[in-house]
Amino acid sequence: MRFLHRFGTIGRKGGAMLAASLILAAAPAGAQEQPASDDLQQPMDVADIVTIACQDGTELHGVFTEAGVDLSLPDGKKISLPETETDEGFSFTNGAYTLAGDEESLTFTTGKAAPVACDIKDDGPPSKFDAPLFIDTEPLPADSANPDIQPQVNCYRFQGYMVKEVDLGEKGAESLSIAPQTAACKKAAGKDEKLVKDETAGYFLGSKGKFVFFQAPDGVNGGLPFVVYDQTTMKRLFEDSFAGQDFEGMTVDGDKITLIFDRVFSASCSLYTGDATCMGEVKRATGLGDIAPIPDCKAEYDQEKQANPESAAEIDKVPSVVTYKAQLVWDGAAATITPQAGPTVCHLAS
């Protein structure tokens, strides 16, 4: 699975109806005049990468593939919903979750709960990642012990290379690798395939030029940890953590990549009392203090203490987490992080 709102392809089946209706609804004037051929698999445009907002506050990010639809849930869980036959409209389900509807409506169902009405939300500007030239999805045999989960191999083909993700439905991909662009999309590793073995790498996140991003299988302290590799050398370059759904800026110049994002820094200490040692740690690690302030954490801690007065003494010591806008520059040898002007936020580590 992947950070699913970033990219995708429309196949001859598996989401074609819904994806096509989304294109017509979201595409700019004039973009609807040229229909895609039924005989070819067309790369998705920005309009096909959708955010689904439901009336109960749930927000899903999805991409349609030949096999169905892949969704990212609010808690970071990734699910694949195969297309199922229905008399009217469309339906994608793995038994535990269902996305269904027609050209006029859309619902999302969890387990045996009542379906919740949803709408397609304008996702704003396109992702800063490169769109794959093509995405292959190869279904794998289901596990008899867990028949509701559809294991699959996801292959993202870019110019000159392919990123492969073997997803068996567990938390985190079974394997991640980088292979030649034309490599076969199958579970078994090919001879020129290079495995990515990294504690941070749980799923493929996206690519920009030769830089390949992998995300953690779960969020941590309100942020999503990520790690970046150079696909030409397979060298691990740097890791960090960001908040939100995407990077604000991402540019590549040769061996240099520059990122602008809401950075999540988890301190080893509590900023609640204004302890000078802790303030110094946060300032050294983030650069906060001049361009943007180190946040005042008192209100966050006091609110938690009021909700749990019996644990007040322990809450005082809970490490602080700081979110702020940052610029990260990898110059080919090292990463430099500098704060940007803007708000800073404090909350307690979870």
Image (cartoon, grey):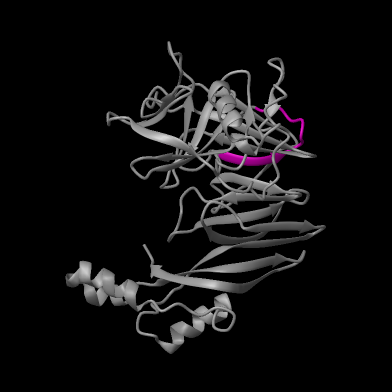
Q: Quadrant of residue 296?
A: bottom left
- In the displayed structure, 254 sits above or below 298; it is above
Where is 21 relative to 224, above or below?
A: above
The residue lying at 59 percent from left, 25 percent from top is 20
* Residue plotted at (71% across, 31% down): 30
Q: Position of residue 132 (x, y in %)?
A: 70, 38
Q: Is residue 51 left or right of residue 210?
A: left
Can residue 31 be seen?
yes
Whole-percent x, y for residue 147 in the image = 40, 23
| Residue 93 shows in the view | no
Residue found farthest to the left: 310
The residue that appears at 42% across and 25% down in the rendered structure is 100
Q: Is residue 158 magenta?
A: no
Which image quadrant is residue 337 in? bottom right
Q: Residue furthest top?
A: 87
Q: Position of residue 33 (x, y in %)?
A: 71, 25
The picture quadrant where one finds residue 67 is top right
Q: Is residue 90 left or right of residue 310?
A: right
Seen from the viewer's position, the closer of residues 179 and 204 is 204
Magenta residues, as a range? 175-185
Relative placement, left or right, of 156 versus 108 is right
> Closest to the observer: 327 or 161?
327
- Residue 180 is covered by the magenta coloring: yes
- In the rendered image, the residue lying farthest to the bottom is 276
For the C terminus, give its image quadrant.
Answer: bottom left
